[in-house]
Image (cartoon, helix red, strand yellow):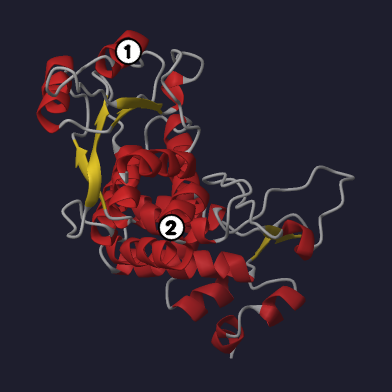
Amino acid sequence: MESDRVLDGGRDALRDGGLTTGEVARCLGVAPTTIRSWDHRYGLGPSTRADGRHRRWTALDLRRLRRMCALTGAGLPPAEAARLVLDESSLLVPSPQPEGRPVPPPAARGRSRAGSGLRLGGVRQECKGMARAALRLDAVALDELLGAAIREHGLVDAWTELIMPTLQAVGRKWETSGERYVEVEHFLSWHVSGALRRHAPPTAPGTRGATTVLACVPGENHTLPLEVLTAALTERGLLVRMFGAALPVESLVAAVRRTGPAVVGLWAQSRTTASTPLAQHVAAIEWGVRGARMKPVVFTMGPGWAGRTARGIPHPPGLAEAVRAVESLAAR
């Protein structure tokens, strides 16, 4: 039976040059006109055409159509279902090699290029699963993948090698597609934030050492990198007070005076929000009795500070370096 060939992974179909539209329709239990409509309206057509005219559907084409059937059967409008199917399949198809350039052997490829779609570049294979779950807006699958990544690789490596590359890929997709994927970026960021809190709650017992204050500078709303640092420091048993996005100057100064932190971390994603005078002002804040005054060590964090920091104000280049630098001071 033709359906048996499809269920076996399409090996016979590939060997025989693919299935006809009628054969595909019988396998999927839909009308041939539906298959043709999905082709004409949404671009879910066959990869090859025999003799330049006749449609021949491959195993990959069949997987896409089967996914389309499942989504529309669940009540999703056909246009939206087709968009998700094309986005998901683009993660599975490798980018075409320029003519004359040899295709690298599997051992050399190691990490997936992930084709067009989210353009995941040389990141690890696990990124593809996170990206596809985010594109599907599949909360359960995304939470499971994020939790497994943190448990298997540790918080710092999971963020650096898996989570951050996936976030960057989704961000690039949003920037180049007319803001079509804003919901995917927000969805992914929200679930990353939840995974961090589940892994290392900010109020974890057994804290030690002096306080670390973490805040975004005024005008800066990108909090996720600071949430990662908060979770990493809390995981190590350190006391962290996290103030989140766009903390006003007056509030930042008040928080430093009230808590007497050993370390203050200021995050700036953009050069337009990074302010060297602000960092210097916080570093000069004093408290304590006369003759035994104390000052915090201020760390400038994030790409916005590149080339803009002042002498005596360190700028850790990445998460691992920031964790080590803060821990060495706050744990004393």
Q: Which mark is residue 280?
A: 1
**Three-letter amino acid code at the position of disc 1:** Gln
Q: Which mark is residue 224?
A: none
| Residue 142 picture quarter | bottom left
Picture residue at 53% right of the left edge, 46% below the top? 117
Position of residue 135 measured from the top left corner of the image (x, y, whole percent): 39, 52
Q: Quadrant of residue 70?
A: bottom left
Q: Is residue 236 above or below residue 312?
A: below
Q: Which residue is mark 2?
A: 130
Q: Nearer the viewer, mark 2 or mark 1?
A: 1
Separation (CA) of disc 2 from disc 1: 40 Å
Local packing at callout 2 (Cα closer than 10 Å; few below 14, some 14-19, many 20+) is many
Residue placed farthest to the front in the image?
Answer: 291
Q: Is residue 279 left or right of residue 257?
A: right
| Residue 15: image location, x then y, percent | 76, 77
Q: Is residue 146 above or below residue 20?
A: above
- Please tell me whether mark 1 sits on a helix, a strand or a loop: helix
Quarter of the figure with the N terminus: bottom right
